[in-house]
Amino acid sequence: MKRRQHWRAGKTAVTVGLVVGLGACATGCGGATAEGASGTTGDTPVTLLKRTADTLRATGTSQATTSMEMATGGTRVTIRGKGVYDYDRQLGKLTIVLPQDPAGASEHRPITELLAPGALFMKNRGAGVPADKWVRVETSTLSDGNLVTGGATDPFAAAELLRGTRSATYVGRTELAGTEVRHYRGTADLAAAARSASAGNRAALASAAQGFATVEVPFDVYLDDQGRIRKLRQRFSFVNDSGKGTVAVASTTLLYGFGTPVDVQLPRAADIYAGRIAENQPTR
């Protein structure tokens, strides 16, 4: 039997490795030709969106802001992040801010996350982890492929999910933070995305295809005139622990500051925590 790690709350909340572990807050047809993000015509929305990840790789780097919202049992939780990403190396650094506890306790310390092909590194993870140590998680062992575990969707993984676009429509032009963008709405297939993804994200997306309640991921995406993603909102669905309902998770990624210098250094082996995590530690 294949061994895999998962967080105890992995199918019930965006907070699979974070909020629960820290005790926080409990489409149309793509066949019609549409104006492309480059200002030309001839691409269908589906064809255009499938190559947005390649466009980001060609762009190089950017700044990123993320937010993740979970709604379950009448409770809504929002986790926010901000950082930078190198699309060519598939390396990123985010600072994640968790919400206050329901009782109004003091805010949690921000969590630093390093995103790398096949791995998530977290510092200030809590749950008994020394302050100077990192927790390393293999993303392919997570039932969501780390699309939500870290409280933020890896920006490049989010873009690669669009490789699995099954249907999409061109909604129209609008403005986002002073930039003219084109708005597209559609649905992506996780399994199809995994088959077309880069080597660094292939296993993680395949795991997500098996772990989510459905392989279909509705999305809204806004592209600038260079075909670069400026905003991407994706909606995921988990089956809760009882198996009698689902948990809705909405992940929003904003990309800007393209060309920003990015220097992400992964932790040395000696800086990675090798002990047991007090709560929600990885299990078989």
Image: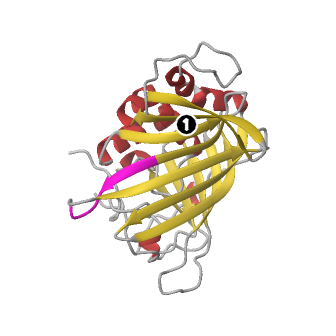
Where residue 224 sits, quadrant-wise, is top right
**Colour setting:** secondary structure
Residue beneath disc 1: 159
At x 64% / y 37%, what residue is drawn? 87
In the rendering, at what x and y percent does residue 7 appear? Answer: 36, 61
The dominant secondary structure in magenta is: strand
In the rendering, at what x and y percent does residue 176 appear? Answer: 71, 44
Q: Nearer the viewer, residue 111 or 266?
A: 111
Q: Quadrant of the C terminus?
A: bottom left
In the rendering, at what x and y percent does residue 133 appear? Answer: 57, 67
At x 45% / y 50%, what residue is drawn? 146
User: In the image, what residue type sits under mark 1?
Assistant: Ala
Q: Is residue 57 magenta?
A: no
Residue furthest top as drawn: 42
Q: Which residues are magenta?
A: 235-242
> Can residue 155 be seen from the camera position used here?
yes
Q: Is residue 21 left or right of residue 83?
A: left
At x 59% / y 73%, what residue is drawn? 131
Q: Is residue 154 left or right of residue 94?
A: left
Is residue 74 shown above or below 112?
below
> Can residue 117 be seen from the camera position used here?
no
Q: Is residue 254 left or right of residue 15?
A: right
How many residues crowd mark 1 within 10 Å: few (<14), some (14–19), many (20+)? many
Q: Is residue 237 magenta?
A: yes
Is residue 121 shown above or below 118?
below
At x 67% / y 28%, what residue is drawn? 227
Q: Quadrant of the N terminus?
A: top left
Which element is circle 1 on? helix
Q: Nearer the viewer, residue 32 or 8?
A: 32
In the rendering, at what x and y percent does residue 216 appear? Answer: 36, 39
